[in-house]
Image: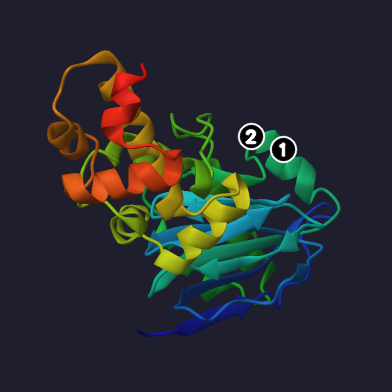
Amino acid sequence: MSTFRKRTYSRNPKLTPGFSVRSVGHFQLSPPDHEARRTFKFGEIFWCVAGSGVFRLDGDEFLLKPDSVWYYPPGSFHDYDPAEADFQYYWLTIDGPLTSALFDGLGINPGLNYGGNCPVHLFSRIANLLPDTNPGAGFEVLSAAFEILSKIPASCHSDIEQPTLAESARKIIDSQFIDSSFNVEELAERLSVHRSTVSRIFRREWDISVSDYIINCRLKYAMMLLRETNTPVRDVALESGFSSAAYFSRVFTVRTGTTPAAFRRSK
């Protein structure tokens, strides 16, 4: 696991009274690293190029993955962590009284946005020009920043509502629970996050553990098969995602207070 933080701050006087590029950077973080959790007055975007990070806004948590952009508007509480090793992203901050109007006018929404391939060359251009106090360099910085921001809402995916990490986890479980090998580890791998991360977020959102939710899905499906088909109990167990008929009967009896066979007779 490697970690680095490369940042550059502007030394150029503000070219406009409304907004200016404050700083730019290229970070790579790995758990348990994280940046300062506090409120900042400037607007900031994070463009993911590798790995993934968990970002929080208004009580919800979202997964930032490659080709996605996160936007914290001025006055936001910045709260995010790397979800896996080597979470890598480029970032850009815009400062000034008209910063919010700039982002609003470009159609960039607070939170998760789609951006496509990160324009690394534009971030690098800004990093090279920011220390230059020449006004000409300052205008080039603004030009590169506008080009970066214009690529975010220009995507055809920019108006798609992105699901939260907890919602994505639930959708994956709902479609995969009948696979007996599916478990918390595979769910975390599909989401590109650590097992503890998805477990914590899932329980907080749905008030149930991932393992219990998987079992509940399997039991609900098994009950449907027992009620509506004549499929043998052993086959019901396997078709519902349980590893064996014995384990299925044991879980079914503990959770429902009756055996699968007795449940079928009472339908």
Residue where numbered disc 1 is placed: 104
Three-letter residue code for mark 2: Gly
Dot 1 crowding, Cα within 10 Å, few <14, some 14–19, many 20+: few
Q: Amino acid at mark 1?
A: Asp
- Evaluate if marks 1 and 2 touch, with contact meaning CB atoms under 8 Å apart: yes
Figure check: 112 above or below 89: above
Q: Tell me if 257 is positioned left or right of 16 in this view.
A: left
Of residue 24 and residue 244, the one placed in the foreground of this image is 244
Q: Where does the image place residue 70, in percent across and percent down from the top left?
A: 57, 52
Position of 257 compared to 181: left or right?
A: right
Q: Kindly identify which numbered label has been placed on residue 147.
A: none
Label 1 – label 2 distance at C-alpha: 5 Å
**For residue 40, side relative to residue 61 (left or right):** right
Viewer-side residue, 85 vs 220? 220
Neighbour tally class for label 2: few under 14, some 14-19, many 20 plus, Cα within 10 Å: some
Q: In terms of secondary structure, where does tag 1 sit?
A: helix
